[in-house]
Image (cartoon, helix red, strand yellow):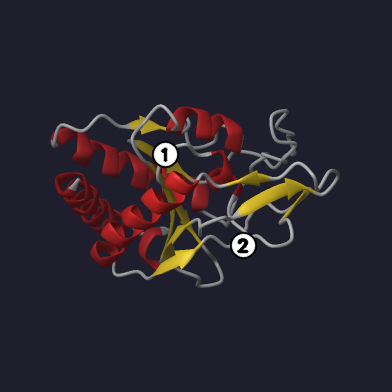
């Protein structure tokens, strides 16, 4: 599986030649780079103890990896789990809705739609994981909108979701639980490990 500790060491734009989408990442909320990285390491250690093979979407907390580069790593795995938190208090386990799509503002005809199998698999993954974390299942909220838009007639989704070829979820954890809170991150890592193990046991 791929664990993706959210965001990168600098803000930038990067156009994906295959889709025309801006796949540049950004630094996220204060403390998010460090907290998500630590949460990913804790979760990876627990999963590896159980025999799972875990790929990280980047090599260090401050690495820059575009959303395309992250998707390329994740697409070699069975699932992609993205770790985030939101300063505004938004929480949830997000997955792309069916028929969700994005396109570049500069060329709205270049529509990239979430693969139906990915949408269905992502929904199943989100519904398996959410109860363990005490979070609601939600639709993707769009994200990374600079230079990107949502084509008429389609729901919006995260850029990573349209690039994914495997089930993908984005977990928006409680900021107060994971930021500057090692014991909170240890708790979330344990919950997430249990959730992922239960998901694979049910397949």
Residue 1: mark? none
The location of residue 92, given as percent across then percent down, is 42, 66
Q: Is residue 41 above or below residue 178?
A: above
Q: Residue at x 56, y 71 (%)?
A: 88
Which residue position holds label 1? 166
**Quick one: quadrant of the N terminus?**
top left
Q: Secondary structure at mark 2?
A: loop
Q: Is residue 20 above or below residue 142?
A: above
Which residue position holds label 2? 155
The location of residue 38, given as percent across then percent down, is 37, 44
Q: How many marks?
A: 2
Identify which residue, 202 or 37, lies in the foreground. Answer: 202
Q: Is residue 91 above or below residue 73?
A: below
Q: Residues within 10 Å of mark 1 (few under 14, many from 20)?
A: many
Q: Residues within 10 Å of mark 2 (few under 14, many from 20)?
A: some
Q: Confirm whether residue 64 shows in the render.
A: no
Query: Quarter-wise, where is residue 76 in the image?
Result: top left
* Cα distance between the residues tagged 2 and 1: 19 Å
Identify which residue, 32 or 191, lies in the foreground. Answer: 191
First reached walking from the N terminus: tag 2 or tag 1? 2
Q: Secondary structure at mark 1?
A: loop
Q: Residue at x 52, y 34 (%)?
A: 70
The location of residue 55, given as percent across then percent down, is 36, 30
Q: Are marks 2 and 1 in contact (CB under 8 Å)?
A: no
Q: Residue at x 15, y 31 (%)?
A: 51
Q: Residue at x 40, y 45 (%)?
A: 167
Identify which residue, 105 or 2, lies in the foreground. Answer: 105
Q: Confirm whether residue 150 shows in the render.
A: yes
Identify which residue, 189 or 193, lies in the foreground. Answer: 193
The location of residue 196, given as percent across then percent down, is 24, 48
**Quick one: quadrant of the C terminus?**
top left
């Amino acid at each position: 599986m791929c664990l993706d500790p959210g965001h990168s060491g600098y803000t930038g734009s990067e156009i994906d030649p295959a889709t025309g989408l801006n796949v540049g990442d950004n630094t996220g909320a204060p403390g998010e780079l460090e907290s998500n990285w630590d949460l990913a390491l804790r979760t990876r250690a627990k999963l590896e103890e159980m025999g799972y093979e875990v790929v990280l979407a980047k090599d260090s907390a401050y690495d820059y990896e575009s959303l395309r580069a992250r998707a390329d790593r994740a697409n070699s795995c069975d699932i992609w789990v993205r770790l985030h938190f939101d300063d505004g208090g938004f929480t949830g386990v997000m997955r792309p809705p069916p028929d969700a799509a994005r396109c570049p503002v500069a060329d709205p005809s270049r529509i990239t739609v979430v693969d139906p199998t990915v949408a269905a698999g992502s929904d199943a993954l989100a519904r398996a994981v959410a109860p363990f974390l005490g979070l609601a299942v939600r639709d993707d909220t769009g994200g990374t909108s600079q230079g990107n838009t949502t084509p008429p007639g389609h729901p919006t989704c995260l850029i990573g979701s349209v690039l994914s070829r495997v089930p993908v979820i984005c977990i928006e954890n409680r900021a107060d639980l994971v930021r500057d809170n090692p014991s909170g991150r240890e708790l979330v890592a344990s919950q997430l490990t249990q959730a992922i193990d239960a998901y694979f046991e049910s397949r």
